[in-house]
Image (tube, grey):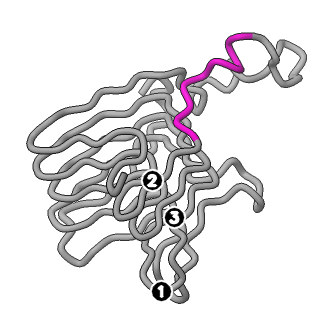
Amino acid sequence: GHNGGAICVWNSGSLVVNGVPTVAHPSFLTTADGQPRTDALATNALIIRHNQAVLMGGAIVLENGGSGRLRGVRIEKNVITYSGGGIALLSSSLIVALSTFVNNTASHNQYSRGGAVFIDTDGSLTTIRSKFTDGTNKNNNRCLRQGLSGHSVAIAGEARKYETIEMSNYPYG
């Protein structure tokens, strides 16, 4: 579709997604001796992956008064042609906690914005203890447009808010 490759929330709709908060609980991803898990807990984590759209939100778009909360979600390998490889917000608000954005792409070489997230007119994003990379250089989010277009987050001039909150003393978010 044109907007929201996996999920489109619009006209004051709401979205709540709760997964395994691996950012706060890295022990979910490793065994007692520090090796990567291969059991159901590791392989069935909530991942929103391999979605594609044209205009806004490769995986998720919230528009026209939509609101949402994502917790413990991994958003990866989603592609948008223009705005927000992972998520796009237009006149909507989203809180993302204990989540990870990895390898999302905004692909147009002249007009793309926001490899992971694009915040458009009256959009609002708050991230709490969330990451925009897995810590390696090869799985980062990217925007193929030349210049300042936001590999992780791009913000339109009319956006309402973008803030990040780190609460390391409160690991349960």
Q: Quick one: label 2, few (<14), some, or many (20+) residues within 10 Å?
A: many
Indicate whether residue 96 is drawn in magenta: no
- What secondary structure is marked by label 3? loop
- Gap in angstroms between the C-alphas marked 2 and 1: 17 Å
Examine the image and state in which quarter residue 88 appears.
bottom left
- 72 up-or-down from 121: above or below: above
Relative horizontal placement of residue 57, taking residue 43 as reference (left or right): left
Q: Quadrant of residue 26?
A: top right
The stretch in magenta equals 40-49
Residue identifier under label 3: 115
Q: Residue furthest front?
A: 1
Tell me, for residue 110, which label it has, or none: 1
Which is closer to the viewer, label 1 or label 3?
A: 1
Question: In which quarter of the view is residue 55 placed?
Answer: bottom left
> Residue 31 appears at what percent x and percent y?
82, 15
Badge 2 is on which residue?
58
- How crowded pointer 1 is (Cα within 10 Å; few <14, some 14-19, many 20+) is rated as few
Residue 96, above or below 85: above
As drawn, the label of residue 125 is none
How many numbered circles are shown? 3
* Residue type indicated by callout 2: Gly
Instruction: Pinpoint residue 173: horizontal percent, then vertical percent.
Output: 41, 27
Q: Mark 2 or mark 3: which is in front? A: 2
- Taking the image as shown, residue 84 lies to the left or right of residue 67, namely right
User: Does the residue at mark 2 contact the one at mark 1 (Cβ under 8 Å)?
Assistant: no
In the rendered structure, which disc, 2 or 1, sits on the residue that comes first in sequence?
2
**Is label 1 in contact with label 3 (beta carbons under 8 Å)?**
no
Closer to the N terminus: mark 2 or mark 3? Answer: 2
- Of callouts 1 and 3, the N-terminal one: 1
Local SS, label 2: loop
Determine whether, in the image, residue 70 is placed left or right of residue 138: left
Q: Amino acid at mark 3?
A: Gly
